[in-house]
Image: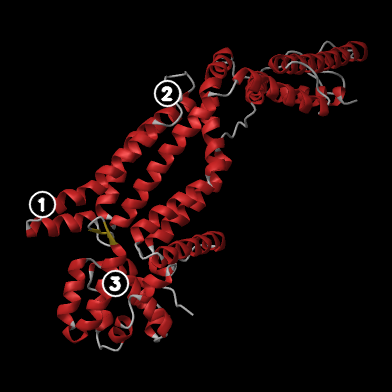
Amino acid sequence: MDILATKTGSFFLMRWIQDIQGLLMDGIFRVLNAVGIPNIGLAIIIFTIVIYLCLLPLTIRQQKFSKLQAKMNPELQKIRDKYKDRKDNDSMMAMNQETNAVYAKYGVSPTGSCLQLLIQLPILWSLYRVIYAIPAYVAQVKNAFFPLVDELIGKSGSAEFLQSLSGAQMYAKQFTNESFTSGVTEYVQNTYIDVLYRSSTTDWSTLLSQYPDLSESITKTTDLLSRYNNFLGLNIGDSPSVTFHNAWASGAYLMCVAALLIPVLSAVTQWISVKLMPNQNTQPTGDSTADSMAQSMKTMNVMMPIMSAVFCFTLPAGMGIYWIAGAVIRGIQQVVINKQIDKIDWDKEIEKNKAKAAKKLEKAGLTGNLSSYAEKSTRAIQAAAGEQQQQVSQARLSRRERITRNSSASSSVDSSGLYVDNPKKGSIAEKINLVSDYNDYNR
């Protein structure tokens, strides 16, 4: 059985998703190898396409919600304006009822696309982890490091030397792990593979200088990795920054341009993907929370392409290929989905949703038009509150009548000491009256 390199210590759900995606990536690479093109860059692109196609139903729902939200915003804004200066509980309840009625009218949940995002996030995060740790999931890539890894393990001081390489910084804990220090072969092998897979071309040259007697194994491994990692002339194991530096130093200016294409294309494709998203209202609405969220979204849409370019310049080129492929696929999906959504007869869709919402209200024992239901509910609440206040006032009147009948003195306190006329606000007498009113109301 193949021994895979170290996997990330994710909790069980993430690890389960990563293992499934890892099997998919391994299968894609095996097929590519069978047809004579075992290329990690091409495998990443195909892998990304398959994952995004699997997420297509969720993407459609998410974009449909975004389109509907743009249509709902004017109605929601009218409701916010209507209750802008009314902060009492009854008004807040009425506003919530009317807002929910609008969402029901368009057939969407107030939580929007949160569920779709919650489902997509672990899948996309696991996708990133699988691509970032290819040897942990693709057995053939892991096998390329043998017999070199076993020979390095037999060399005294090789672990200390590996820790000096640029690719070893993120694996410092693995070198101090009990499994490593106690000499568990499988764990040590995985750690060596992790470091060597992250090593740049310069690191491999340093390794060859340090261990010239292992030149045959080093050359065999680098040849295989070059075959697997070469994508349009770029080594996807190197970051564009390293490729650019080495190419500039050697005068290979065409390679410098190729290295810069990865971050530039990443930023451009991200920007196009953002622009293709369904338009949402970003104008001030008067609602501080909504305006803050809209402004944050606008800022994020500007920053995402810039951050993408920075990350893709410093991370291995394979991650840049993944981001570019993902942005291109999302862009194509958005164009196709938007065309389909634009063909929808929204008037018919709204009528269907109204009928569904009316049935729900009927099952709940409520009847009436969606648009007027909130207003009716508010009137009912106010009527109930008025009736309760009237009962309390009647209880107070009854108490005063009893005071008048039973008290022989002209004191403002009743004979039992339980009620005070016209008490000072905040006084103990007022609190006594509240208790008395409560007792009378519940008598």
SS of the residue under disc 1: helix
Q: Amino acid at mark 2?
A: Thr
User: In the image as oriented, which residue stretches furthest toward the right?
Assistant: 405
Label 3 is placed on what type of residue?
Leu
Give the mark nearest the N terminus, 2 or 3: 3
Q: Residue at point 38% right, 42% down?
A: 328
Packing grade of label 3 (10 A; few <14, some 14-19, many >=20) is: some
The answer to whether the residue labelled 1 contacts the one labelled 3, judged by CB atoms less than 8 Å apart, is no
Mark positioned earlier in the residue sequence (2 or 1): 1
Relative depth, front residue between 402 and 307: 307
**Based on the displayed image, in which of its 4 quarters is residue 307 positioned?**
top left
Q: Residues within 10 Å of mark 1 (few under 14, many from 20)?
A: few
Q: What residue does disc 2 label?
A: 282
Label 2, label 1: how far apart the Cα atoms are: 43 Å
Q: Secondary structure at mark 3?
A: helix
Q: Amino acid at mark 1?
A: Tyr
- Image position, residue 20 (x, y; %): 53, 62
- Looking at the image, residue 206 lies above or below residue 14: below
Residue 161 visible to an observer of this rendering: no
Give the numbered dot on residue 98: none
Question: Residue at (49%, 22%) from the top-left corner?
Answer: 287
Instruction: Tell me how far mark 1 sits from mark 3, CA to CA.
Output: 26 Å
Residue placed under numbered mark 3 in the picture: 224
| The disc label shown at residue 253, or none | 1
Q: How is the image coloured?
A: secondary structure
- Residue 125 picture location, percent across and down: 46, 53
Seen at 70% across and 25% down, the residue is 428
Task: Report helix, strand or loop for mark 2.
Answer: loop
The mark total stands at: 3
**Does residue 156 appear in the picture of this structure?**
yes
Task: Give whichever of 157, 87 is nearer the camera.
Answer: 157
Q: Quadrant of residue 388?
A: top right
